[in-house]
Image: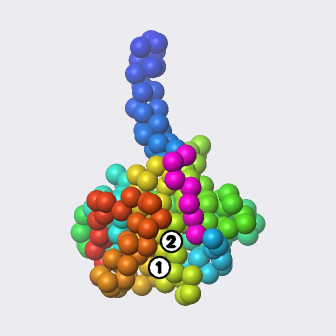
Amino acid sequence: MVTKKKLVGGLLGPISLVMMIAGCSSNSYRKTVESVDLQRFMGDWYVIGGRFTFLEKGAHNAIETYSWNEEEQQIDIAFSFNKDSFDGEKKSIPQTGWVVDKQTNAYWQVSPFWPLKLDYLIIALDDKDYSWTAVGVPSQSYLWIMAKDAKLSDETFQKIVQDIAKTGYDVSNLVKVPHR
């Protein structure tokens, strides 16, 4: 027999997790780049550094792949990495994205699992050759700096961080992702 206490207690874990993750969707930061060419943005992005979720801790060789799904009018996202070392267990986290602001294509919502949809803001982008980008969330809790090449120089990384800081986005406590 399931008691009310067991039912409520059993739901607190998932509800707490959803509420914690939903904190990414507060209304505090909404600045994005002026424009994103979705076709140029699609493809592999090496996660170079940032402030990560608990699922990404210890990531090595992290790659986020975006593919435009014409039939569904959505972005299929494949995130993969090795856990805790270059030879660590291979992890994959599939996600789905939708463009919210179709004028700029820089504000998306991303779902790691149903029914959760999180705000995803493209806050910086090398608009010349799309060689690097930075993605944040409205609460500024998370930040991902990504590049088309895993060998992004420290000088370029620092320039990106400075550009992001100029927008008012928090750039403290950043961690770099090891790649080989």
Our reading of the magenta stretch's main secondary structure is loop
Q: Is residue 54 left or right of residue 96?
A: left
Residue beneath disc 2: 124
Image coordinates of residue 37 in percent, x first then y, are 66, 77
Q: Residue at 46% of width from left, 32% of height from top?
A: 15
Image coordinates of residue 76 in percent, x first then y, are 60, 65
Q: Compared with residue 66, is residue 8 higher up or lower down, i.e. above or below?
A: above
Q: Residue at 49% of width from left, 74% of height from top?
A: 133
Q: In this view, does 80 lie to the left or right of 75?
A: left
Amino acid type at circle 2 is Ala
6 in magenta: no
Name of the residue lying farthest toward the bottom: 129
Q: Is residue 15 left or right of residue 75?
A: left
**Range drawn in magenta:** 27-33
Q: Compared with residue 40, is residue 70 higher up or lower down, i.e. above or below?
A: above
CB within 8 Å, label 2 to label 1 = yes
Residue 80 in view, yes or no? no
Q: Is mark 1 on a helix, strand or loop?
A: strand
Amino acid type at circle 1 is Trp
> Residue 42's quadrant in the figure?
bottom right
Q: Choose between 8 and 155: the one closer to the eye.
A: 155
Residue 52 in view, yes or no? yes
